[in-house]
Amino acid sequence: FIHAIRKYTHAKIYFIIHDIESLRAYKGNQNYQKKELAIFNSTDGMIVHNEAMHRWLTEQGVTVPMEELGIFDYLNPIPEQNQPSYDYSVCFAGNLKSAGFLQKLKLKQGRLDVFGPNQADKYPANVNYQGLYPADQLPKYLKTSFGLVWNGDLLTKCDGDFGEYMQYNMPHKTSLYLSSGIPVIVWKKAAAAKFIEDNQVGIAVDDLNDLEQLLTKIDHQQYEIFKQNSLEISKLLRNGSFVKKAIHNLMQQTAD
């Protein structure tokens, strides 16, 4: 594909990184990584997820100009959830096959609403499976105070290939929640934590065993700040603002 563009046109080639498989499904496979990095270096520039991904690519020898996206935009047709009331409730949406931690999470206050395929046979009290919905309809059913971004089997950290990958990528569920006007709870070591904390649209946690205690410490005034900031970010996500800005900046970087 790249060879054909180079051979028959004078166009510049920019990549928007969706996933880096050398960091995920092919982690540790040096042959795969070498080929993937070579493809990246054959472009005129790339839009990468964040500072952590940018730094890793530079350390691995990627030399083309890179611009950081920050967060993925999200085309969300459902009106934002704009009720500011705070009731300690949390939702989690995703493939439940890689969310074994849900079977260990025990909550006495509030509730955790769970959406997605591959539900477990049983969840603890206050963890409520709510079904599977098409992506464009799912936001209609997200009616909680926070959305959770977590992956793996453990409560103490995000584990497994996909969990460790969170140290570099920006998960789409982050954008799902924020485009719905819902503040986010994320693993503190995830790359997404910086965006969440810098923009005051939620909290970063080390350990889900502490989740209930952290939720009860948030007062209604603090939650209102998270909520209003999330609604502001939602407007940008629904308008494609982050990718537009990143493309503009990358083109400025590589202008002849």
Image (cartoon, grey):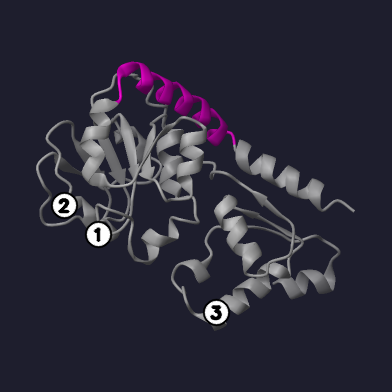
Q: Is residue 183 above or below residue 209?
A: above
Position of residue 196 measured from the top left corner of the image (x, y, whole percent): 46, 37
Q: Nearer the viewer, residue 232 or 115?
A: 232
Q: Which residues are magenta?
A: 218-239
Whether residue 235 appears in magenta in the rendering, the answer is yes
Disc number lying in front (1 or 3): 1
Q: Is residue 129 left or right of residue 48?
A: left
Q: Name the residue carrying label 1.
A: 153
Decide if residue 230 is in sight here. yes
Task: Give how far apart the Cα atoms at labels 1 and 3 are.
Answer: 27 Å
User: Is the Cβ of the residue at disc 1 closer than 8 Å to that at disc 3?
Assistant: no
Check disc 1 and report its element: helix, strand or loop.
Answer: loop
User: Is the Cβ of the residue at disc 1 closer than 8 Å to that at disc 2?
Assistant: yes
Position of residue 177 measured from the top left corner of the image (x, y, whole percent): 40, 37
Which mark is on residue 104? 2
- Label whose residue precedes the other's in the sequence (1 or 3): 3
Q: Is residue 170 above or below residue 211?
A: below
Position of residue 118 measured from the top left corner of the image (x, y, whole percent): 23, 58
